[in-house]
Amino acid sequence: MRALAHRNFRLYFAGQAISILGSWVQQVALAWLVYRLTGSVALLGVTTFAALLPQLVVGPLAGAWVDRQDKRRMLIGVQALLAGQALLLAVLTATGTIGATLIVAMSALLGVLNAFDTPLRQSLINSFVGGKGDLPNALALNAMLFNIGRFVGPPLAGFLVGLTSEAVCFAINAVSFLALMTGLLLIRVEAPPRATGSMAAVFREGVRYAWAAYPIRTLILVLAALNITASSYAVLLPVFAKDIFAGDATTLGWLWGAAGSGAFAATVFLATRKSLPGLVKVVLAGVVLSALALLVFAYNRNIGVALASMALLGFGISVCNVGINMLLQSLAPDHLRGRIVSFFSSTRFGFDAIGGLLAGLLAAAVGAPAALLLEGVLLAGFTVWLVGARRRLRAEVAAGTAALA
């Protein structure tokens, strides 16, 4: 918890805690709304694809734009726009105007806003803790917030949907953004250095650096493989909750919450890590665990085993995603951080979008269990290559962190 010794990070941490909880409530309520209105597995994949694709397409350019801006001011503005999107979604749902086309459109709008929100938030954390000494701990604590929300938010959303409606969940999310906006307004921090030059030149500089640095290039490849396969489970959870386990929105909430509990445990574990080269082993173990848990969940029909495998899958995915983020930000020079974060977020969420779309279409053709089984087999195959690359990756991470220190 050492990063919480910094006042600016405490303000950000408190506001982010409330905002993330609201975002998870909206995500689960929206997935349930889609499946309740249409019963379409494919539309679940399309909706997720629309929400995440902008991270892949817009995200890298957003990183170049972010590195040229006053990041704190821009982040406050983006939070206001996110609140407006959630409020509009609540109104459309409450009035019965919402339909498949509007759901996809609103998801795409959310994706565009998140393409700017993620690199803005992530690249500011370094300045909130005054440098790289406490940066890995701050990133782990930030991810811990996300996963606490992932653990608490889905069951809460299931309860709220059953008690009220999806529109209420969307309205709650709109209000939650005010907490982070307030925290950002109270923060007093020197603005990080800005990149100079045209957008094109700034973007090319970031691409050249990421491609030339073996650890960054390899970690981004691992990120892509993990999220195009293992992370696609989220798209199909409503199908498992309703059709495989004969449940309702509450069942969906518990499945999502089980994954969140594993992810929370992963971030607690990562917050105690002090050796960055040692994180390479952790990331490798996370990929292996994710593949195994995905295979078990796809094959199983017992709800108890399903919850346990979801917890293990949440741990594996989170320990990889957060561990890779910690490594990338620790290796990145200050003036390139926004761009490196944008490459991380565009790969993390963009390949999640592609994987979600493919999983939805595949499940419509062969069924949800078979779709996830195939994803697990593909990820298991990728680990064979990763085992061979682990020694060079660890050695170059150690060299890179030593050079920056």
Image: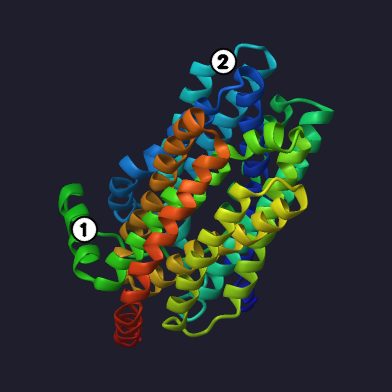
Pick whichever of labels 2 and 1 is earlier in the sequence.
2
What is the x, y in percent for residue 343? Answer: 33, 55
In this rendering, would 330 be left or right of 160? Answer: left
What is the x, y in percent for residue 81? Answer: 51, 35
Q: Quadrant of residue 141?
A: bottom right
Q: Residue at x 70, y 32 (%)?
A: 242
- 95 and 395: which one is in front? 395
Look at label 1 and name its amino acid.
Answer: Val
Q: Residue at x 56, y 23 (%)?
A: 40
In this rendering, would 95 be left or right of 362? Answer: right
- 54 and 396: which one is in front? 396
Label 1: few (<14), some (14–19) or many (≥20) C-alpha neighbours in 10 Å: some
In this rendering, would 93 be left or right of 227? Answer: right
Q: How is the rendered protein coloured?
A: rainbow
Q: Quadrant of the N terminus?
A: bottom right
- 69 and 326: which one is in front? 326
Residue located beneath label 2 in the image: 99
SS of the residue under disc 1: helix
- The CA distance from mark 2 to mark 1 is 39 Å
Residue extending farthest right: 163
Relative to 334, is 296 above or below? Answer: above
SS of the residue under disc 2: loop
Relative to 28, is 286 above or below? Answer: below
Q: Residue at x 49, y 67 (%)?
A: 288
Confirm whether residue 72 shows in the render.
no
Label 2: few (<14), some (14–19) or many (≥20) C-alpha neighbours in 10 Å: some
Q: Quadrant of residue 158?
A: top right
What is the x, y in percent for residue 289? Answer: 54, 65
**Residue 207 tag number:** 1
Confirm whether residue 145 shows in the render.
yes
